[in-house]
Image (cartoon, rainbow, N blue to C red):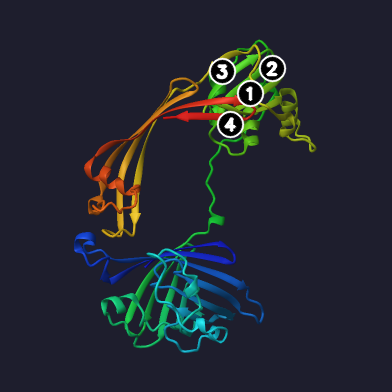
Amino acid sequence: KYNISLQVMPWLETTIRYTMVQDLLYSNDPGFSGDTKYTDKGIDLKFRLWQEGKYLPETSIGLRDFGGTGLFDGEFIAATKRYENFDFTLGVGWGYLGTRNNISNPFCKISDGYCTRPSDYKGSGGMVDYERWFKGPAALFGGVEYQTPWQPLRFKVEYDSNDYSGDFPVYRGGVDMTPATPWNFGALYRLGNWGDARVSYQRGNSVALGLTLRTNFNEMKAHWLDEPKPEPRPTAYASNDQQVDWDTVIGELKTNAGYDNVMIEQSGATVTIIGEQTKYRDRQEAQQRAAGVLANHLPKSIDTYKIVETKQHLPLTTATVNANDFKRIAVEQPLDQSETDAIAMSGVSKPVNSTVVRDDFDRWDYSISPTLAQSIGSAESFYLYEIGLDAGAELWATRNLNLSGTVHLNIVDNYDKFNYIVPPDGTDVPRVRTLFRAYVSDNTLWVKNLQATWFQEFGNGFYGQVYG
């Protein structure tokens, strides 16, 4: 069994699960699935109704395998209460969790329709069969967890509400899954904040091993080793007659402020930098860094900086920096002002009578990257994969026309197991991703894509592109 669970909200837990039924093959036709085991995919939801209080237990309601073929579908209502080092759970289950039928279904008192559970499912599976929910036999289940004095170790004992008489291997393969006892015993060892290892003795005749890996997205942080923000210094301001090292300016704008493919224009006392932001999501952070770079390199006679941010060489925003105010605030650091007070956003406009003093337009770029294509739960193999390399390149013929392409090298794969063919009677669904096998099996090297794109700015915030 493979499970992935995600608690997206404090009151909601979601699970997607694959179960490989070892006693059954995927199909009765060896030419179709070979010796691949039967695989079932299920989706679970668990909702918290209310939290645990001093006397009130925490109570949840859950749906298991609610959108599949119904092999493991079930519903439950469970209450949990902690007392010192013990955690007690008691619940009632239906469907897969109610086959022991040790209590009468309480919903039968509401309607006779809840007394029997439909055994069929909609279509070919994958649909929500809400008509089955909370119907048919019901059973009590429960358990106790004990936290030992040794912090990593916990013990569990539980009463199982499933007698396994309705399991798929039983009614399809004739496999005997009769439990010797409804009691299960287990131990869980905490490996740290990242996982648990567990072992259990179940049904009086089975041993189970398990490993859980986990993380908390709220606690995951990127380790950002960033350069400090440039600090404007009065002694560093260039004199009016000093020659500016534009190559150094462009280099610092890229590494410190994150502006790439920079063009620098000058019109009188105004210097405009035009470039694509590739480093900072916070636009103000990038603008302050760029203004700091310019303040340390441009002559005192330049009193205005303009920072035009582009995408695909099309202008998106313009920030106008009052150079003198920016330097004063950066040096004096008054309590009632920040560097952003010297920066104003304005509409995109082209400089008038400007001179291009430096253009770092990079027409050519290339990349090489590993790729992984994969499919899970196929008939021929539970896991199909293809590992390869993408070699990509792009050329800007002009600032509006981009030519790009990618060549793919297949290194290793097992897609030769994938033997699906189009049915000869013409009843097949139009194929999409299944054609991938034809590329992988018959080729080692192929062109993945080849494209020409024209980008255009229409003004007033409107942009367009056309590609082939």
Examine the rendered structure and indicate whether residue 381 appears above or below residue 22: above
Q: Which amino acid is tagged 1?
A: Leu
Asked whether the residues under the numbered discs 4 and 1 touch, taking CB atoms below 8 Å apart as contact, a structural biologist would say no
Identity of the residue drawn at 31% across and 57% down:
383
Q: Amino acid at mark 3?
A: Trp
Q: Which mark is residue 257?
A: 4
Residue 260 as seen in the image, left or right of residue 27 = right
Q: Is residue 103 left or right of residue 52?
A: left
Give the spatial CA distance, label 2 vs label 1: 10 Å
Mark 3, Cα crowd under 10 Å, few <14 / some 14-19 / many 20+, is: some
Label 2 vs label 3: CA separation? 14 Å
Badge 4 or badge 1: first in the primary sequence: 4
Marks 4/3: CA distance? 15 Å
**Between 292 and 261, the one nearer to me in the picture:** 261
Q: Amino acid at mark 2?
A: Ile
To which residue does mark 2 refer? 302
The answer to which of marks 2 and 4 sits earlier in the sequence is: 4
* Earlier-in-chain disc, 2 versus 3: 3
Identify which residue is drawn at 59% across, 25% down. 458
Q: Which residue is mark 3?
A: 246
- Residue contact between numbered discs 2 and 1, judged by CB atoms under 8 Å: yes
Q: Amino acid at mark 4?
A: Ala
4 or 3: tag closer to the N-terminus? 3
**To which residue does mark 1 refer?**
294
In the rendered image, residue 159, in percent from the top left (x then y), is placed at 45, 85
Q: Secondary structure at mark 3?
A: helix
Residue 311 visible to an observer of this rendering: no
